[in-house]
Amino acid sequence: MINEPSDSQEPKEERNGSPSPKRRIFHFRPPSKIVKRISEPLWMRRGWQRKGDDYRGFYRTQYGSYQGKIVYRYAGKVQFFIINPPACLKDHPHAPCFISKGGGKFEVHFEEKSKTIDDGILAIEQILIDAHERSTPHLD
């Protein structure tokens, strides 16, 4: 892509004393790259399966994968569940947000409602990562 020439340079005198014609300077820019937006939602890219208003899949972290279920209710209300979360979660500040429903199933309550299913998945995965990292002893 070529920008407009710059006329900011003053004419310079040639060796014989007469002014030289104006020089035009062109600035070249490399072509812009087009970044294609990912149109598939995160839950689909992560392998969650949808059946009606229910989604089933796994919350994935570098520490392990945990079975989950998401239920889309009326008026945008979404319920998030995790099955058999890791034990390290019990000492995490967000432990009270994981409410036991029996049989190893926990409903995850958010202080602020998740805007999308993808937001909820990412938030739960981040809590799981943080719980593992807080429970792992670090060598200083």
Image (spheres, rainbow, N blue to C red):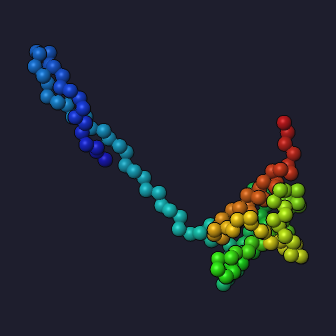
Picture quadrant where residue 9 is located: top left
**Residue 140, horizontal then vertical, whole percent:** 84, 36
In the drawing, does residue 49 fall left or right of residue 86? left
* The one of 117 and 37 positioned closer to us in this rendering: 117
Placement of 9 over or under 118, stated as above or below: above
Residue at left offset 66%, top offset 65%? 119
Q: Residue furthest bottom?
A: 52
**Residue 48, horizontal then vertical, whole percent:** 68, 73
Placement of 109 over or under 55, stated as above or below: above
Placement of 17 over or under 54, stated as above or below: above
* The one of 129 and 100 positioned closer to us in this rendering: 100
Residue at left offset 69%, top offset 62%? 122
* The one of 73 and 138 positioned closer to us in this rendering: 73
In the drawing, does residue 10 fall left or right of residue 125? left
* The one of 40 and 117 positioned closer to us in this rendering: 117
Picture quadrant where residue 120 is located: bottom right
In the drawing, does residue 12 fall left or right of residue 133? left
Q: Residue furthest top?
A: 16
Total numbered circles: 0
**Residue 7, horizontal then vertical, whole percent:** 22, 34
Residue at left offset 28%, top offset 43%? 3
The answer to whether residue 6 shows anywhere in this view is: yes
Residue at left offset 88%, top offset 56%? 91
The answer to whether residue 67 shows anywhere in this view is: no
